[in-house]
Amino acid sequence: MNNAMEGFMVHGGECIQGTARVEGAKNAVLPILAASILTEEEVVIRDCPALRDVQAMISMLKMLGCQCEMREGGLSIRSSALHNWEMPDEISKEIRSSIFLLGPILGRLRKATVTYPGGCEIGLRPIDLHLKGLRALGVNIRDRQGILLCDGGNMHAGDVYLDYPSVGATENVMMAAALLPGTTCIHNAAREPEIEDLECFINAMGGRVRGAGTQLIVIEGVKKLHGTCFTPMPDRIVAGTLLCAAAITGGEVTLENVRPRDLIAVEAKLAEMGCRLYDEKDRVHLKARETLQAFSSLQTQPHPGFPTDMQAQMMAVCAAARGTGVIVENVFENRFGHVSDLNRMGACIRVNGRVAVVQGVEKLRGCRVCARDLRGGAALVLAGLAAEGETLVENIRLIDRGYASLEKTLCRMGARMERITLS
Ligand code: UD1
């Protein structure tokens, strides 16, 4: 996918309205694709979103020897021929989600070699908790100049205590333990809904995992897992972003294929700002006021706290609201990359360490801006929708990591924007 030189041209001032269906969640699909190698039988993933990160994971699975094909019924993965336990150097460095393969490769082949993943746009993103968790299961890990040689010859079930409820570390340990004889307990596990989805997937393959969604996850290892057909949960961050698009433009939307219980924190903030929300079983409806009021404060936290993946988008909405809102980013150390571009668009945001003070302005104005990370890029698009004039968002390959053709979804809901090739 060569979209390094593409941008979004957003013509501001249109209301976002109408109905949209939300696709499968990126953060559920990535670990589920990785976990599919725990069985030799065919796994079919329905409603798999067409995202750059998903494509990258499929490429990695192919490099390991798996067959992956898009069929009518979904994405089919067969890993009976899985033979390679070495993740190619350049891929592991570039794509952070390659780390999700460590647990399942170890689970299946009892050895793995990966390169220490590099940092990314939102911070250092260390993997010490992943490695500590795997070591607690008896994996011997040696670091040879940035290459991690993992020997799972003596792997065993056991107790894993996570110093911090890391989403990725919780998922990696769950996958590594699924085929280990005995009982593994993950204490202080992350409680994100995507972890519950991974539990459902492993259990759909015949695994015995319980407790996901709580701080204690218990995995009874089984001898073998079997094939299955699975539909991942809907993307709560895409849903939240579309709600913000309606909120910032004074619009009214209905989202289908959502789970309102996953959106509680985001809906509460939007309601605090003056939006009216109405939940149904698998739909949510939002009607915005013409002028929104800034929330007083927003703190990102591990689930069920406010999701860090919605911080940038809520900042954009607050920047165009009346009053002043304070945002504290507690999860990542460097997740305010979007602030300078929002300020170039006329926003009034001051940052001090992990705290941002957002003073709402009457009008944002379009200009040329650049996505620096996935969600920050989405925030710039939202600001562009509400701004006067035209906003050119560059570097949208980062936005394509997590939104399937965002421009098409928003245009169907009344936006005027297009994907353009930049010279
Ligand atoms: C996942 C999500 C990401 C989301 C994040 C937090 C996926 C594919 N990505 O990322 O969208 O923003 O959860 O909800 O699901 N940490 C360590 N050591 C580790 C692991 C993490 O210090 O070994 C730190 C990180 O630097 C970060 C914090 O823990 O500051 C949270 O990270 P984590 O929960 O692991 O996030 P990811 O799994 O990387």
Image: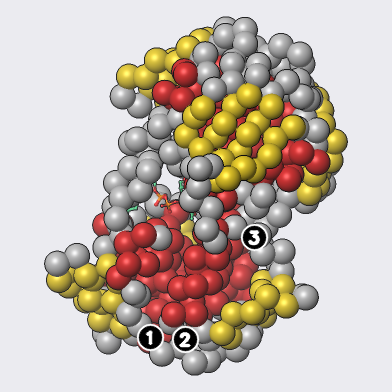
Taking 255 as reference, is 97 left or right? left
Marks 2 and 3, the one that precedes in the sequence: 3
Residue located farthest toward the left when viewing the structure as drawn: 145
Marks 3 and 1, the one that precedes in the sequence: 3
The residue to which callout 2 is attached is 65
Marks 2 and 1, the one that precedes in the sequence: 2
Kindly indicate whether the residue at mark 1 contacts the one at mark 3 (C-beta within 8 angstroms): no
Dot 3 crowding, Cα within 10 Å, few <14, some 14–19, many 20+: some
The residue to which callout 1 is attached is 84
For the point 65% across and 19% down, which residue is it? 389
> What is the secondary structure assignment of the residue under circle 1?
loop
For the point 26% across and 84% down, which residue is it? 154
Relative depth, front residue between 395 and 275: 395
Question: Mark 3 or 1, which is nearer the eye?
Answer: 3
* The N terminus: image quadrant: bottom right
For the point 23% across and 76% down, which residue is it? 149
CA gap, disc 2 to disc 1?
6 Å
Taking 279 as reference, is 396 left or right? left
Residue 233 to residue 181: above or below: above
Residue 409 to residue 37: above or below: above
Relative depth, front residue between 40 and 88: 88
The chosen color scheme is secondary structure
Q: Position of residue 267 (x, y in %)?
A: 67, 31
Quadrant assignment, res 262: top right
Taking 293 as reference, is 171 left or right? left
Kindly indicate whether the residue at mark 1 contacts the one at mark 2 (C-beta within 8 angstroms): yes
Dot 1 crowding, Cα within 10 Å, few <14, some 14–19, many 20+: some
CA gap, disc 3 to disc 1?
26 Å
CA gap, disc 2 to disc 3?
22 Å
The residue to which callout 3 is attached is 50
Residue 183 to residue 191: above or below: below
